[in-house]
Image (spheres, rainbow, N blue to C red):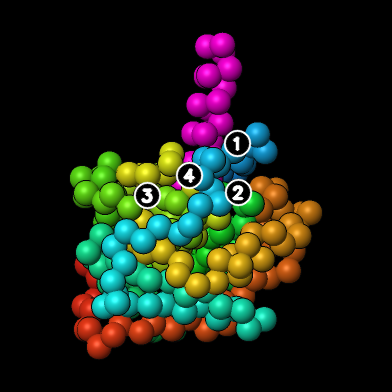
């Protein structure tokens, strides 16, 4: 029984590292794990039983900024950002969106029952905006109580806690093991069917991690409605 418990805990830990390994990777020689350092998710790792539950409403407000991701097939994902949960993370995301940073970038990693990840201008999991921001999550000294439930958006990073840049992931299912370890900062309000469509794409058979869609999942245009609120430029780590 103890042996089975140890194996189960190890698999959950490996699943969490998948996001760590491919995120926040910087194209300026920053602390990015190489592809060979990135462990694969075991098929036996299961999300929590509430994976199909309704999208959480914590932090929701009609004054919060709304980001719309338009895919190249015309399908969209609408995301409400939570400035009160992770203010600098939201500032960073809005800044990048306004600059058109995400236009034409792909979701390079998709794992059913886990998440979809994008935001790398290189499309490899190794790129970023050329800087990093402080990780706004609890285990990095910043109180962030937003859980990684289905539909929540969070910043990807390397194993360094302050290495997030532009890469982000959207939860396809609940994953409590990521809570307090990554800077969650909003949730999908419309378009989870588009997330489901992306995560269930046929995978490139030549991808060693077996998580890259064979057909590129391109974010054609990403826009933000700030509801008339001015958001400042993020505090960055050069």
Estimate the spatial distance between the alpha carbons at disc 2 and disc 3, rounded to whole Å: 16 Å
CA separation, marks 2 and 1? 9 Å
- Which residue has dot 2 on it? 113
- Magenta stretch? 1-27
- Whether the residues at callouts 1 and 3 have beta carbons within 8 Å, the answer is no
User: Residue 227, located in which quarter of the rendered image?
Assistant: bottom left
Kindly identify the residue that appears in the image at 56 percent across and 51 percent down.
Answer: 52
| Quadrant of image for the N terminus | top right
Q: Earlier in the sequence, mark 4 or mark 3?
A: 3
- Determine the residue positioned at 41% across, 64% down: 187
N-terminal label among 1 and 4: 1
Q: Report the Cα–Cα distance between label 1 and label 3.
A: 19 Å
Residue 45 numbered mark, or none: 1
| 72 to 143, vertically: above or below | below
Residue drawn at x 30%, y 83% as measured from the top left: 226
In this rendering, the answer to whether 231 lies above or below 59 is below
Query: Quick check: 191 above or below 110?
Result: below
Residue 8 falls inside the magenta stretch: yes
Cβ–Cβ below 8 Å for labels 2 and 1? yes
Find residue 50 and report its horizontal and vertical position in percent.
51, 45
């Amino acid at each position: 029984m103890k042996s089975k418990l140890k194996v189960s805990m190890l698999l959950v830990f490996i699943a969490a590292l998948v996001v760590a390994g491919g995120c926040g990777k910087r194209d300026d020689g920053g602390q990015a794990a190489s592809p060979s350092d990135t462990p694969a998710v075991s098929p036996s790792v299961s999300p929590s039983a509430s994976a199909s539950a309704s999208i959480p409403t914590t932090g929701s407000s009609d004054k919060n900024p709304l980001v719309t991701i338009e895919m190249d097939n015309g399908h969209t994902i609408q995301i409400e950002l939570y400035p009160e949960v992770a203010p600098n993370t939201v500032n960073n995301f809005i800044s990048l969106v306004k600059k058109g940073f995400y236009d034409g970038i792909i979701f390079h990693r998709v794992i059913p029952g886990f998440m979809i990840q994008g935001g790398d201008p290189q499309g490899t999991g190794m790129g970023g905006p050329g800087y990093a921001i402080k990780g706004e999550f609890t285990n990095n000294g910043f109180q962030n109580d937003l859980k990684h439930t289905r539909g929540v958006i969070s910043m990807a990073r390397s194993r360094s806690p302050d290495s997030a840049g532009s890469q982000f992931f959207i939860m396809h299912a609940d994953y409590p093991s990521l809570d307090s370890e990554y800077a969650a900062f909003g949730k999908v309000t419309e378009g989870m069917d588009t997330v489901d469509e992306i995560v269930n794409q046929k995978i490139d058979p030549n991808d060693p991690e077996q998580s890259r869609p064979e057909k590129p999942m391109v974010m054609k245009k990403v826009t933000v409605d700030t509801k008339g609120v001015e958001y400042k430029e993020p505090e960055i780590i050069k």
